[in-house]
Amino acid sequence: MTKKVLVLPGDGIGPEIIAEAVKVLNLANSKYNLGLELVDGELGGAAIDKHGVPLADSTLALAREVDAVLLGAVGGPKWDTIDKSIRPERGLLKIRSELGLFANLRPAILYPQLADASSLKPEVVSGLDILIVRELTGGIYFGTPRDTIILDNGERKAFDTLPYSESEIRRIAKVGFDMARLRNQKLCSVDKANVLESSRLWREVVEEVAKDYPDVELSHMYVDNAAMQLVRAPKQFDVVVTDNLFGDILSDEASMLTGSIGMLPSASLDANNKGMYEPCHGSAPDIAGQGLANPLATILSVSMMLRYSFDQSQAAEAIEKAVSDVLDQGLRTGDIMSAGMRKVGTAEMGDAVVAALEKL
Ligand code: IPM
Ligand code: MG
C-alpha cells in the first residue's frame, strides 16, 4: 500500500533545504522500496501569498489524510507587518495543534567530525547525545486569554496565559519516560516550580507518572539552572522533558552544543506516531535564496520520519550514515565550517549525501 508524505517547503531557506531532503527521500524510497508518494502543499508565508491564510483548509485536510508531513521553515520580513491572526507562524502552530502533535522530539547529537565547530570546548561536548522532549500543543503558546489592551490611563498592556492540564502533562511525561527507557534510563524534567503554578502541577504529575517507570531515574531541574548546566556540563543530560516555551528555548541552546542549529532535526508526533518532521531552525531570511543554508537538519528529519512514522530503521540509519560519511569527506556548509574543511553550498551538500547513500 502506498503511504503519503505531504511536503511543505514554507518560506526563506525552506524551499532550498526541502529540495535537498526530497532528493534524499526519493532515493531512500526507491532503494529501500518504501512505497512512499510525495504530495506538495504550502504553509506560512507561501500559503498567505497563495491562499490568503498561513494554513488553508485544503492543506490541513491533506495533512490529516497523509501518513507524515515534511516541513521546511516558515516566516520572513515580507509578512512581518501582516495582521497577527494570520502571521506565517500561526499556520505552523495551527497544524501542530490540529494534528495533535503534542510530542516534539529534538535530538542534539554531536557528530564527532564537528567537535571543532561547537563554540564549547571539545572535551565538554564530545560524545554528546541528548534528547529534548518538548510539549508542543499546550502551554503559553496556546493559552487564553491572551491580548493587548489599552488601560484607562492610555497605557498599553499585554498578557499571555500558561495553562497545563493534568492529562497534557501526563501524556508528554510518558513520552519522556518511554524515550528514557529506550536510551539510558535517565530523565530530567525541567520546570520553574519555584515560581509558576503550572510548573508545580507539572512536577507533581511527572512524579505520579514516574511510579510506572521504577527503572528510570528521574530528576527535576529549574529551567534557569538547566540553561546554565547545558553549557557547563551538557553530558549530564540524557532525556529532558519540558514544556512548550522552555523546550523551544533549551533546544536552540542545545543545538549550539552540536556545532550549529543547522544540524538539529525534529519529529512532532501524535498519540499514534503520525508525525510532522522539520528542522529546528527557522527560515533564515538573511541567507535565503543564496544556496548557503545547511540542509542536514532537514535531511536528518527525513531519517526521523522513516524511523518513527514508517518503522524503517534500516533506511533511517543509512541516511544518518550517509550524513556522517559526507562529514568525513570534509564537506561543510558555512555554519559548520572549520579550518582545513571544504566549504560547500546547500545543493552540493545534498548531492553529496545522495551520492553517499547510493553507495551504501
Ligand atoms: C521552533 C520555532 C517555532 C516555535 C516558531 C517558528 C513559531 O522556533 O519550532 O522551535 O517557537 O515553536
Ligand atoms: Mg524555536
Image (spheres, rainbow, N blue to C red):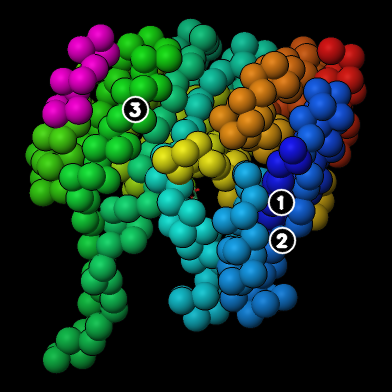
Which residue: 49% across, 15% down?
Answer: 128
- In the image, 156 versus 172, the foreground residue is 172
- Where is mark 3, residue-wise? 176
Pinpoint residue 292: horizontal percent, then vertical percent.
78, 43
Q: Are marks 1 and 2 in contact (CB under 8 Å)?
A: yes
- Marks 3 and 2, Cα distance to the nearest angstrom? 31 Å
Pinpoint residue 289: horizontal percent, then vertical percent.
80, 55
Q: Amino acid at mark 2?
A: Gly
- Element at label 2: loop
- Where is mark 1, residue-wise? 7
Marking on residue 41:
2
Pinpoint residue 137: horizontal percent, then vertical percent.
38, 52
Pinpoint residue 255: horizontal percent, then vertical percent.
51, 31
Residue range corresponding to the magenta coloring = 207-217
Q: Amino acid at mark 1?
A: Val
Image height of 60 relative to 202, above or below? below
Q: Residues within 10 Å of mark 1 (few under 14, many from 20)?
A: many
**Residue 152 occupies quadrant:** bottom left
Instruction: Say whether residue 262 is left or right of residue 249.
Output: right
